[in-house]
Image: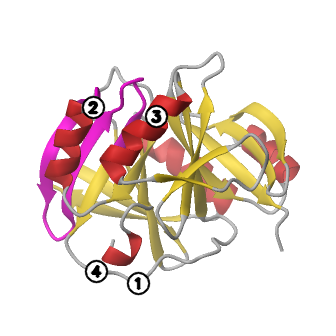
């Protein structure tokens, strides 16, 4: 969570009503390990790939909300991000809040209703790997009601710019140095952010997810010059993308 990574997604978090079931599912599917940290009257779980903290897992703070993954973008000023997001038609869900020894974060939904978080890290860390490995997070997709407005919104909020896309017809946003996400028109679903995990083989991962009690929402989409994606839902209801790269 350092200046190297400003404007990039540096953390993901799943909020669910059944943390044990989520641990069982993702532990078997990806080989992730879990470290529980007591935080006051709640427990926050660090999801680990090997020895590296990869994501967070926690009980949903709002029981009526669906289980979901949330992506955190590294920023220089969480308060400023919340202010700009609200001014540009978004709604701040969690006002800027300090997490001791971690940093300051805020959560907002954009003009279309897609939720994302911003984090001002307290300490510097190493630059993110350029090529995420198997079972690491690798990408974000924004499904929205208005692709052009989304590009303009996030240009103001996170400073993202349109990037040269690897495949025809794609809209890709990112920092000056890195691609961060693609933006698509939402088709038959509410606007949302999706996060993706690298797998070796899409078909095998889809089959394994089903055997572990999940569902395959979208079995396969081939992305020219990039790879193959699918979308699954874990047994607690949270959707997650899978990605098989064809890049060498």
- Sequence-first tag of 3 and 2: 2
Circle 4 residue: 124
Task: State the CA–CA distance, disc 2 to disc 4.
Answer: 29 Å
Percent x, y for residue 3? 32, 75
Percent x, y for residue 97? 13, 50
Q: Nearer the viewer, residue 165 or 66?
A: 165
Label 1 neighbour load within 10 Å: few <14, some 14-19, many 20+: few
Q: Which residues are magenta?
A: 89-116
Q: Nearer the viewer, residue 55 or 236?
A: 55
Circle 1 residue: 126
Task: State the CA–CA distance, disc 3 to disc 2.
Answer: 10 Å
- Please tell me which residue is depicted at 55% across the width and 78% down the height of the picture: 129
Quadrant of the image occupied by residue 198: bottom right
Task: State the CA–CA distance, disc 4 to disc 3.
Answer: 29 Å
Residue ranking furthest to the bottom: 126
Disc 3 element: helix
Percent x, y for residue 163? 59, 55
Mark whose residue sits in front, 4 or 3:
3
Circle 3 residue: 150
Task: State the CA–CA distance, disc 1 to disc 3.
Answer: 30 Å
Q: Is residue 137 positioned above or below 188 on the image? A: below
The reply to whether discs 2 and 1 touch (Cβ–Cβ < 8 Å) is: no
Disc 1 element: loop
Task: State the CA–CA distance, disc 2 to disc 1.
Answer: 32 Å
The reply to whether discs 4 and 3 touch (Cβ–Cβ < 8 Å) is: no
Disc 2 element: loop
The reply to whether discs 1 and 4 touch (Cβ–Cβ < 8 Å) is: no
- Please tell me which residue is depicted at 48% across the width and 53% down the height of the picture: 161
Q: Is residue 1 positioned above or below 229 on the image? A: below
Task: State the CA–CA distance, disc 1 to disc 4.
Answer: 7 Å
């Amino acid at each position: 969570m350092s200046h190297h990574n400003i404007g990039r997604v540096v953390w993901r978090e799943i909020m669910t009503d059944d943390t044990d079931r989520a641990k069982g599912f993702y532990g078997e599917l990806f080989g992730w390990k879990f470290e529980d940290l007591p935080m006051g009257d709640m427990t926050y779980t660090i999801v680990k790939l090997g020895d590296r903290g990869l994501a967070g897992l926690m009980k949903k703070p709002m029981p009526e909300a669906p289980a979901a993954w949330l992506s955190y973008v590294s920023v220089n000023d969480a308060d400023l991000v919340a202010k700009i997001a609200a001014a540009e038609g978004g709604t701040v869900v969690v006002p800027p809040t300090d997490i001791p020894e971690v940093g300051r974060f805020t959560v907002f939904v954009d003009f279309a209703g897609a939720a994302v978080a911003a984090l001002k890290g307290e300490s510097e860390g190493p630059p993110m790997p350029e090529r995420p490995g198997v079972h690491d997070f690798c990408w974000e997709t924004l499904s929205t009601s208005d692709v052009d407005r989304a590009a303009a919104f996030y240009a103001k909020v996170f400073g993202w710019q349109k990037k040269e896309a690897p495949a025809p017809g794609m809209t890709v946003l990112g920092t000056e140095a890195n691609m961060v996400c693609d933006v698509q028109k939402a088709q038959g679903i509410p606007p949302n952010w999706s996060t993706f995990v690298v797998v070796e083989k899409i078909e095998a991962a889809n089959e394994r997810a089903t055997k572990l009690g999940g569902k395959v929402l979208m079995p396969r989409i081939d992305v020219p010059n990039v790879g193959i994606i699918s979308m699954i839902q874990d047994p607690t209801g949270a959707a997650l993308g899978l990605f098989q790269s064809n890049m060498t």
